[in-house]
Structures are given as structure tokens and as C-alpha cells.
Amino acid sequence: MTDAEQLRLKLQELQAELREIDEIDGETRRLLEGAMEEIHEALRHDNTEALQHPSLVDNLNRATQDFETSHPGLTRIVGNMVDILGNAGI
């Protein structure tokens, strides 16, 4: 499976997980949804430079800091996405 395919799969997992969680604060939800949109658009346009932008990983990391213990599934999914983006072999 390619990095792009893995990211698409993780995006789907993250979207499903976010639909299940009500108690995430608005700023964290906005960070995650913004990062997801950036990833989705970059994949759609095959823009690997956008996927390698440091702010994308920073936003994902910042978002997970607030819910690391309360939402381990969400933390795992975002961590996997950060790892895939860190490989940058897309």
C-alpha cells in the first residue's frame, strides 16, 4: 500500500472517529478538520509539497496534545498520519 493510500485510509478512520466523539473542544476539532482538509486536497491534487509542509504535522501534533488520554483511538490514528507524513515518500 502506498503512502497516499495509507493517508486516505487514515483520513477515513479519523473522520469516523470524530463523528463518534462529542467532547472535543472547538479549537481542537478545527485543527483536526483543517489538517484533514489540507491532506485531502493535497492528495486530490497530487501535491506532495503540501503534505511535507511542517505546519500540517504541527497542527496534528497540537490537536492530539489535548485528548491524548481521553481519546486513545483518535491519538493513535493521528499519530499514524504523522508517521506517514514524516516518511514523505508520497
Image (cartoon, rainbow, N blue to C red):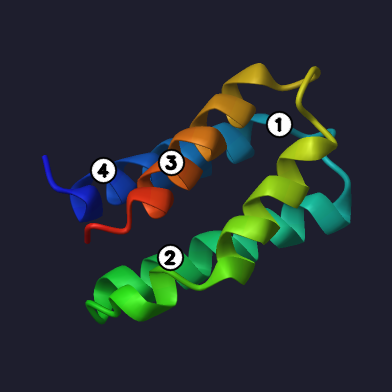
Three-letter residue code for mark 3 = Asp
Tags 3 and 4 touching, CB below 8 Å: no
Asked which quadrant contains residue 26, the reply is bottom right
- Mark 2 or mark 1: name the one nearer the start of the chain: 1
The front one of 35 and 62 is: 62
The front one of 85 and 38 is: 85
The front one of 16 and 67 is: 67
Judging by the rendered image, the residue that carries numbered circle 3 is: 83
In the rendered structure, find residue 6 and report the number of the disc placed on it.
4
Write the residue at 40% across / 68% down.
51
Query: Is 80 located above or below residue 73 in the figure?
Result: below
Q: Nearer the viewer, mark 1 or mark 3?
A: 3
Judging by the rendered image, the residue that carries numbered circle 1 is: 21
Residue 27: x percent and y percent?
Answer: 85, 58
Write the residue at 43% across / 69% down.
52
Q: Secondary structure at mark 2?
A: helix
Dot 4: within a 10 Å radius of its alpha carbon, few (fewer than 14), some, or many (20 or more) residues? some
Q: Nearer the viewer, mark 2 or mark 1?
A: 2
Calculate the distance from the C-alpha at mark 3 to the C-alpha at mark 4.
11 Å
